[in-house]
Amino acid sequence: MTARTVLIVDDEFAIRDMLRMALEMAEFRCLEAEDIQKAYTLIVDERPDIVLLDWMLPGGSGLELLRRLKRDEMTRDLPVIMLTAKTAEDNVIQGLDVGADDYITKPFAPRELVARIKALLRRATGASEGDKIQVAELVLDGESRRIFIADQPLDMGPTEFNLLKFFMSHPERAYTRGQLLDRVWGANVYVEERTVDVHIRRLRKALQAPGGDYSNLIQTVRGTGYRFSSRGVV
């Protein structure tokens, strides 16, 4: 089995070295970059499976690189974990809103980071099994891992796909944020509950398409969490 490739983007050699050793012990292949220019070149040339991206970098912030990756059709689905010393909620939400799949604040335990990487890669590749699930003209194809509205494919990240798949497979039931984390992210993944809200917003936005707006199928249940309901949809 070919080792998965992780690109470590951090301007501090000591952090890159620590991460590389931890990841290589977990049988990952590692690439390293100290700035966003080198990082982007490695992403284009080497096609890593996942990126660990520091927020503060010389020559431009990690957030700037993240925006560039999410604008490009070739890299928008590349999983990204933000590494940051910024613990303020606004900064965390900003990173998630731009397109980060997860974040971890410094200092952190290498074992926790390895666990998050493995969990994110499982979500990104996902299980390919499953028939099509359809609500009116909204179609989820489990085998190709694609979403369509009125036969038009939607741009959707791997976490949003898995979240929608879970919702469409379990309609008309309210789930707490904690339950969604366990069912979609995995029980052993260290992710804060507010992360669910960010991905719900991204999922709703993705479901607003010219062929139909299905964002209202993801309902907020006050005091509980979220529910997928297709009642009233023709």
Image (cartoon, rainbow, N blue to C red):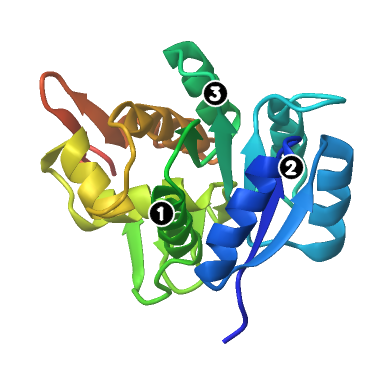
Within 10 Å of disc 3 (Cα), the crowding (few <14, some 14-19, many 20+) is: some
Question: From mark 1 to mark 2, how far is it between C-alphas?
Answer: 19 Å
Tell me the quadrant of the picture where the N terminus can be found. bottom right
**Is there any visible trace of residue 22 in the rendered image?**
yes
Question: From mark 3 to mark 2, how far is it between C-alphas?
Answer: 16 Å
Q: Residue at x 56, y 26 (%)?
A: 95
Which residue carries the number 3 mark? Answer: 85
Which mark sits nearer the N-terminus, 1 or 2? 2
Tag 1–tag 2 contact (CB < 8 Å): no
Which mark sits nearer the N-terminus, 3 or 2? 2
Q: Residue at x 48, y 32 (%)?
A: 107
**Is there any visible trace of residue 138 in the rendered image?**
no
Tell me the quadrant of the picture where the C terminus can be found. top left
User: Which quadrant would residue 230 be assigned to in this image?
Assistant: top left
Amino acid beneath label 2: Phe
Q: Position of residue 71 (x, y in %)?
A: 74, 37
Q: Is residue 134 left or right of residue 176?
A: right
Q: Is residue 152 left or right of residue 176?
A: right
The extreme front residue here reads: 14
Q: Position of residue 29 (x, y in %)?
A: 66, 69
Amino acid beneath label 1: Arg
The extreme bottom residue here reads: 1
Residues 92 and 10: in front is 10
Q: Give the numbered dot on residue 13.
A: 2
